[in-house]
Amino acid sequence: MRPGFSTVVQVLFITMMIITVTLVAATGYNQARSGVVDIGTQVIDGALDKTRERFAERYTETGDRLALLAAALTGLDPVEQSDDVLRSLWELTRQSPLHQSSFLAGVDGLLLEARSLPNPATRFVPAGGGEGREEWVYRDADFGVMTRLKKPGTEYPREAQRLADGTVPEDTRFSDVHPLSLTGEPGITVSRPVHDAEGALTGIIGIEVPLARLDSLLRSGMLGEESVLLIISDADEVIAHPLGPAPGQAGRNPGELLKVADLRQQWIGEAWMRLREKAGIDGGSEVTLLDLEPGRYFVQKKPLTGHLDHNWNLFLMVSDHVVLAGVNRGLHTSVTLALIMMIVAAYVIFVTAGQLTRPLRQMVDNARLLEQLRFGELKPVQADFNEFRALDRSLRQMASSLMAFNRYVPTSLLRRLLSEKHEAALGAESRPLVLLNTGINHFNSVGAQMEAQEQAEYLTRYQREVFEAVHRNGGSIDKFIDDRVIAFWGAPDAAENDTYHACTAALECQAAIQQLSQALRWENHPAMAVRIGLHRDVCMVGNFGSEDRMFYSVVGGAVSVNQWLGNLNGRYGTTILASNPIRQQTAGDFVWRWVDRVEQSGVEGVFDVYELCGHAADPGLAQRRDYIARYEAALALRVEERDLDAALDHFYALHEQYPGDAAVAWQVERIREMSEDEKT
């Protein structure tokens, strides 16, 4: 059988394209490979310089912030104005993820300190110190007081101790590596003197920076997975090492740093020693190509910064595969583009009038997908005739209209309307629903500090996260009211696991908002925390409004109860509170804590309120189960046995062990009030 003319042309065209692409790619690859050393040198040198600049910026910013705060504290009385000073230290600690704590130490032994780990808190030690005289205030993200404790005297920051010895920096000073006062992990302290209005020394202020927090800066400077970037001192000590445990840990004494020769990756130590022998620890170094056990590596070191008393060096190792990978990707991209061009050319040649049936069949498939609301699966129709393209545009415009309509109407309701093919009518039905209500804590005060556009973006990002969590778990959004989002499960179609999905959506929403809050803080926006309520009850659900404009919604007392449950989170310091019907249906799927038995204003009876802690299979909740059991036992003594003294003793014990639990603090206060009422 003889090939047709179009087949011969196609074969010749493809053959010539293959030969041309092969020759061009081979020539370009060989030329690129010959310049690997030069390219690698430029990439490594530029990466090290960029990392050095980033570190220099961090150190300069830290010094500038201390200088500004020192100037602001001039003439202030740190005792009389301790709240203002602590707030300033608190803001200084939160200005950078590198800061662990900030402090102000006076020459008379006074100490004010704000820390970020392990729990955000401020510390006040009056002049002269004294056993049990330290006041610790645990705070929320907005500097609000969560609980106050008196503690025995703990260790002062090292620079504050040196103040007592008469060793005071004349200007901004970066200390050598030493164990930090709060955690014992190695770090450095940046300090600066503070004077009164007459210029007399009154104390010093400082910032403690753990070495472990330098790892994030190192990771940003790495050139892919096959590169290694470390900070090594002139004494061969590993200051920062993002490939393994933080320096100074792994069983060594506090403040003891890992030697480069003791790294698990022995070839890194070998590369460092060989480079040191070649260039000298005090001099610069050119990029060197070394043969090591894992392969060939480009290595280079440069001094990191001149702020410290001891030299730190940036040490970068990059596999030669990293540089060649770019060349290989370029070759792959060129070949891929050439193949695409050949396929397109072959397709154009073989297109005939007989292919008219294919776009028509594709449009029929798109129409069926459109009927099923499967918008994402619609495929563009490839046609050469204007009539087919016009019909395809009409289908896509219809899909866009339905997608826009779907933003206002629950997907399940829209699918039912299309499948049953009848008009929507006013009317509602009574049926059990699962309700979810969310809101942003302190939104009115936070929003008042924003411009209109900023507030709109703040709300939109929050509402997007809530919508995604509800949509993934099969729920429907009822309405957005200011910072509140109301969602429901069970209508128009109900499922046996609606309650489970609602709880899962609440946990996903909690996790998503936590991540969003971190992103907002990085963008210098107010942090965000939410309150979530879950409730199951019989509601009225259906089409409300008028014949001309309807909306599908949920009404009834259960909606108010659900909002009330969400607002109760502010009392107990929780995020997700649910009613007993929710907890009963999912007791085996999630970990719950019985938080309280409360009365709702205007409603007869009492409510058992439960906190949703997480999935039952979550191994991270294993230790919390014992705490939950102790809390619930103490609560039972209060609400069921009415033994207030025993309940107070149990809650006191919990408060000593978990001072940050606002629910425990509230129970203690409530029992005290009940005891006073009984006495009167």
Image (cartoon, rainbow, N blue to C red):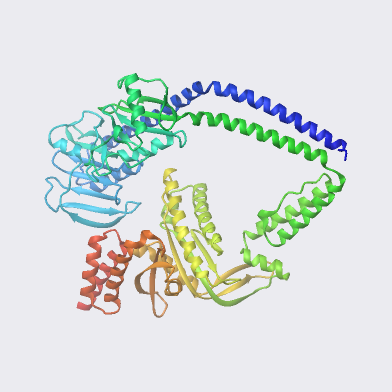
Say which residue appears at 62% left-offset and 63% top-offset: 411
- The x, y position of residue 14, in whole percent, is 76, 33
Image check: 105 left or right of 356?
Answer: left
Quarter of the image where one finds residue 316: top left
The answer to whether residue 51 is left or right of residue 262 is right
Which quarter of the image is occupied by the C terminus? bottom left
Near-viewer residue (341 or 34): 34
Residue 592 against residue 217 in the figure, above or below: below
Residue 372 seen by the camera: yes
Quadrant where the N terminus lies?
top right
Q: Nearer the viewer, residue 362 or 132?
A: 362
Residue at image position (30%, 50%) is 120
- In this image, 261 relative to 110: left or right? right
Residue drawn at the location 66% of the way across and 33% of the way down: 335
Determine which quarter of the picture holds residue 229: top left
Residue in front for this viewpoint, 402 or 544: 402
Check the image and report above or below for 214 versus 499: above
Please state the total of marks drawn on the protein image. 0
x, y percentage for residue 308?
27, 28
Residue at (84, 45) in percent of width and height: 385
Q: Estimate the x, y position of residue 112 in percent, counting from the top left.
A: 22, 45
Kindly tell me whether residue 549 is visible in this rendering. Answer: no
Residue 232 x, y percent position in the rendering: 31, 30
Above or below, 341 relative to 629: above
Residue projecting furthest to the front: 1
Q: Nearer the viewer, residue 308 or 246?
A: 246
